[in-house]
Image: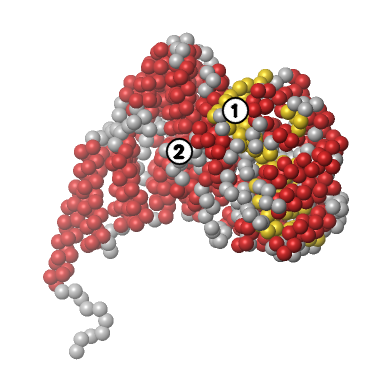
């Protein structure tokens, strides 16, 4: 009878196992020898050495998995294989073999996920993040670095977290957010920031080669890692100060890093930046001498991928020396490397200098083509939105290229190119958002939960301010929470799964857009403003035209006064009628010939820029008439949004009503005497087509708003909200609709869907379009505020008010719009009909409804 429990294996099985282990021991010796051959193979061991090691290491890992998993740590066996696969991938990519590089990285990622612990796997992911950033997949890189940092911090790996912070700072540097890059570097602990005084930073202490690792204790390795991180921080500070224009400090820091770089035999990278600084300062002889000294390093296999960047500096020196032919040859040489070493960040810089060289050589058509390629490369780099701050900082160093390109295209009369260049500067984040459908996601993670908590607390603080019971601590807490919510929203946006499928930015085909508009007798007026100068492009059935308007000091002063008045606590309402009260018309802002042609369209879609977004375009005059007397006027944030918003309007729409909130105790926001009657008037018009009884007074809450926004039948209806609106000019995402006990603000709207295709906001300043946020100029003409948030949430048409709304005029105007809309008139035509009706009834009070603005294209 057999005994209970496990039985000893047969003797022949034990013998087989022993022989397998002996074979593995012998194989391990071969693997170790191959690994050491790599360690002492110089900066770039031959491919044969890598292939030999990888073949042996794969066999060894497979053998351990099959026969020795209980004797040997799979992680310790897999980790060097993962490391060498990643290093080999870098060498293959440098040699131009992108396909094999991708294959090696994919294998490394698979092994890391299968065999490494979370911390070691996170280190691999961190490397992949920087590779994604190099390829322009910034949202992916930011997301990965954020994830691995959480892993390192949770595991108490302070040095790994510090290294991640350095890489994150590098990423912010690439994105142009230099202040945040420096702040991120400052977050690194002091004991990592600087090497110990008795440690000489040399190749032995910083390179961390395999030979170093093999001969070092764990404490020595940690010291080397700290020294290496300190060296990287020093370089990063130098580079960032270069971008900030503080060349003295940049040069000091980079020269401080040179002795370390000499020990590492990597001085070329630092001297490259010193050469760029010398060029920027006009020290051309110094720049040329530095470039000549480091040029051989960029010809070696490991430096070849960076050679095009060297050509950028060389071409810049040639251009400053007025040697366009030489600059062109240098640029073309750099561009030839793009086939084997693609780099969009370098590509746009090369193409910009190519355009400048060609223009100087009198080859204007070729120059425009070069600028097009440069602008397209820059556009691809930021195809996915990263939040308004990073979207803006990313553009700062590219704006001079766009200005050059626009001026050249206009000067040559190349209208389509001029409009295209203008469009690539305008609200591209919104275009990207609209171009990829929102993915339904009922699950809300930690960031979303915290975002909701912060928003709820902000509501409480806001209502304390409205009731005038707030103190200094309240205001300070509000500022802190707004900053936290901005960061949360940026993280939520970056992690949006929509961007994983995005491979190209939202396209702008100017000729196709002109044809689309012309089919229905529509036109689009695309504007680009610089102080004293406006570029205007017109797209209609006759094609594309472009012209410029020099804006004199009187008009500039009037534009500034109009904008300031909108932001004052007690604005002069008469000035809301820009033409009637200030006396300036459309032709004072844009070329008169284009103004008259634009007014001849059945529908005119104005795409403003900068403070021109705030003008009451429809009520401005063209000759003796208001523009709306000649054409229906709609506004769009950019031209690329047109095909994304250009759906057929609702037929026989329903309506949902919310407003006339209870403002008891709010000294800043008194009751709205006309809001209740306005909602009743609209309800009477729709009769049985009201989706649900109006949410008014105590029921006009934020919860009621979100319940309406998410209704399945909202897709057939218009949402009408009558309430106070709050404008926070410095924090545009905090502007919102003030409801009973809470607000719905612009930041909240971009995190949730709104199913209503048409929205009427009968509230003050709901059409406000900021040009800056916290002193950060929105360089990309970013669409921020309630209007943009509603568009992103799902609306396709909005009726809003740019200035504070007159209560009675808003009631009359919006009710008239609904009346014409129910009669079968399209949204923009109903807007025009309401304006014509208001003008006939109250010609002397245009100022009271001049700021009512329609966003849409039908």
| 705 lies above or below 373 | below
Residue at the limit of the structure toward the left, as seen here:
12
User: Image check: 96 left or right of 276?
Assistant: left
**x%, y% of residue 825?**
68, 48
> How many numbered callouts?
2
Residue that numbered label 2 is attached to = 136
User: Image check: 695 left or right of 206?
Assistant: right
Residue at the spot 74% in from the left edge and 35% down from the top edge: 629
Badge 1 marks a residue whose secondary structure is strand
Residue count near mark 1 (Cα–Cα under 10 Å), binned few <14, some 14–19, many ≥20: many
Badge 2 marks a residue whose secondary structure is loop
User: Image check: 572 left or right of 325?
Assistant: right
**x%, y% of residue 332?**
37, 21
User: Toward the viewer: 493 or 485?
Assistant: 493
Residue at the spot 63% in from the left edge and 39% down from the top edge: 636
Residue at the limit of the structure toward the bottom, as seen here:
1
Quadrant of the frame with the N terminus: bottom left
User: Toward the viewer: 210 or 319?
Assistant: 319
Residue 330 disc label: none
Residue count near mark 2 (Cα–Cα under 10 Å), binned few <14, some 14–19, many ≥20: many
Residue that numbered label 1 is attached to = 537
Residue at the spot 24% in from the left edge and 56% down from the top edge: 62
**x%, y% of residue 307?**
37, 25
- For the rendered model, the colour scheme is secondary structure
């Amino acid at each position: 009878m057999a005994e209970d429990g496990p039985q000893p294996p047969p003797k022949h099985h034990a013998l087989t196992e022993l022989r397998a282990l002996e074979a593995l021991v012998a194989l391990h010796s071969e693997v170790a020898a191959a690994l050491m051959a790599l360690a002492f193979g110089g900066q770039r061991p031959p491919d044969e050495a890598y292939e030999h090691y990888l073949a042996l290491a794969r066999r060894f890992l497979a053998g351990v998995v099959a026969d020795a998993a209980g004797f040997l740590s799979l992680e310790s066996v897999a980790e060097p294989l993962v490391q060498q696969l990643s290093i080999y991938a870098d060498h293959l990519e440098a040699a131009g073999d992108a396909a094999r590089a991708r294959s090696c990285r994919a294998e490394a990622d698979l092994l890391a996920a299968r065999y490494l612990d979370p911390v070691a796997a996170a280190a691999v992911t961190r490397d992949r993040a920087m590779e994604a950033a190099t390829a322009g997949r910034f949202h992916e890189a930011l997301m990965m670095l954020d994830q691995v940092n959480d892993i390192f911090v949770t595991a108490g790996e302070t040095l790994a977290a510090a290294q991640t912070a350095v890489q994150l700072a590098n990423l912010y540097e690439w994105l142009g957010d230099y202040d945040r890059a420096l702040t991120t570097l400052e977050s690194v602990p002091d004991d990592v920031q600087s090497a110990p005084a008795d440690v000489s930073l040399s190749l032995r202490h910083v390179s961390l080669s395999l030979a170093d690792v093999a001969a070092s204790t764990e404490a020595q390795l940690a010291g080397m890692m700290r020294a290496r991180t300190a060296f990287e921080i020093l370089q990063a500070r130098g580079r960032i100060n270069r971008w900030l224009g503080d060349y003295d400090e940049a040069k000091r820091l980079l020269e401080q890093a040179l002795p370390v770089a000499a020990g590492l035999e990597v001085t070329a990278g630092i001297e490259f930046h010193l050469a760029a600084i010398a060029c920027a300062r006009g020290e051309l002889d110094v720049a040329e001498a530095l470039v000549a000294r480091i040029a051989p390093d960029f010809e070696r296999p490991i430096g070849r991928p960076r050679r095009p960047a060297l050509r950028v500096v060389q071409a810049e020196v040639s251009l400053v020396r007025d040697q366009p032919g030489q600059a062109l040859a240098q640029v073309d040489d750099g561009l030839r490397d793009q086939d084997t070493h693609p780099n969009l960040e370098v590509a746009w810089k090369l193409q910009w200098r190519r355009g400048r060289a060609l223009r100087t050589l009198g080859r204007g058509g070729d120059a425009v083509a070069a600028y097009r390629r440069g602008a397209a490369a820059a556009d691809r780099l930021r195809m996915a939105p990263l939040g308004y701050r990073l979207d803006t900082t990313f553009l700062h160093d590219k704006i001079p290229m766009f200005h050059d390109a626009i001026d050249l295209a206009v000067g040559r009369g190349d209208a389509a190119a001029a409009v295209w260049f203008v469009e690539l500067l305008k609200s591209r984040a919104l275009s990207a958002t609209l171009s990829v459908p929102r993915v339904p996601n009922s699950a809300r993670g930690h960031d979303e939960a915290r975002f909701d908590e912060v928003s709820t607390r902000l509501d409480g603080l806001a209502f304390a301010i409205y009731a005038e019971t707030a103190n200094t601590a309240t205001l300070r807490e509000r500022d802190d929470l707004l900053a936290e919510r901005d960061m949360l929203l940026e993280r939520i946006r970056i992690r949006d799964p929509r961007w994983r499928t995005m491979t190209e930015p939202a396209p702008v085909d100017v000729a196709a857009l002109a044809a689309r508009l012309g089919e229905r007798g529509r036109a689009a007026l695309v504007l680009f403003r610089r102080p004293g100068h406006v570029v205007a492009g017109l797209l209609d059935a006759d094609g594309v035209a472009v012209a410029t308007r020099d804006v004199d000091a009187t008009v500039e002063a009037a534009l500034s006064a109009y904008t300031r008045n909108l932001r004052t606590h007690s604005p002069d309402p008469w000035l809301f009628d820009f033409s009637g009260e200030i006396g300036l018309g459309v032709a004072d802002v844009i070329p008169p010939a284009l103004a008259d042609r634009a007014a001849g369209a059945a529908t005119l879609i104005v795409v403003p820029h900068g403070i021109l977004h705030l003008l009451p375009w429809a009520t401005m005059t063209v000759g003796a008439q208001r523009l709306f007397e000649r054409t229906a006027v709609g506004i769009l944030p950019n031209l690329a949004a047109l095909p994304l918003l250009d759906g057929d309007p609702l037929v026989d729409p329903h309506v949902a009503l919310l407003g006339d909130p209870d403002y008891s105790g709010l000294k800043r926001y008194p009751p709205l005497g006309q809001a209740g009657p306005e909602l009743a008037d609209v309800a009477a018009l729709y009769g049985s087509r009201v989706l649900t009884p109006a949410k008014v007074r105590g029921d006009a809450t934020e919860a009621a708003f979100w319940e309406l926004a998410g209704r399945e039948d909202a897709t057939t209806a218009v949402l009408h909200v009558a309430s106070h609106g709050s404008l926070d000019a410095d924090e545009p995402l905090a502007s919102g609709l003030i409801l009973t006990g809470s607000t719905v603000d612009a930041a909240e709207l971009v995190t949730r869907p709104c199913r209503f295709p048409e929205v009427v906001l009968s509230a003050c300043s709901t059409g406000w379009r900021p040009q800056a946020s916290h002193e950060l100029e929105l360089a990309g003409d970013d669409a921020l505020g309630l209007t943009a948030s509603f568009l992103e949430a799902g609306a396709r048409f909005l009726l809003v008010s740019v200035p504070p709304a007159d209560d009675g005029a808003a009631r009359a105007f919006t009710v008239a719009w609904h009346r014409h809309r129910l009669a079968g008139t399209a949204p923009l035509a109903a807007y025009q009909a309401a304006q014509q009706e208001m003008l006939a009834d109250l010609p002397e009070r245009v100022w009271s409804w001049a700021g009512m603005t329609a966003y849409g294209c039908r």
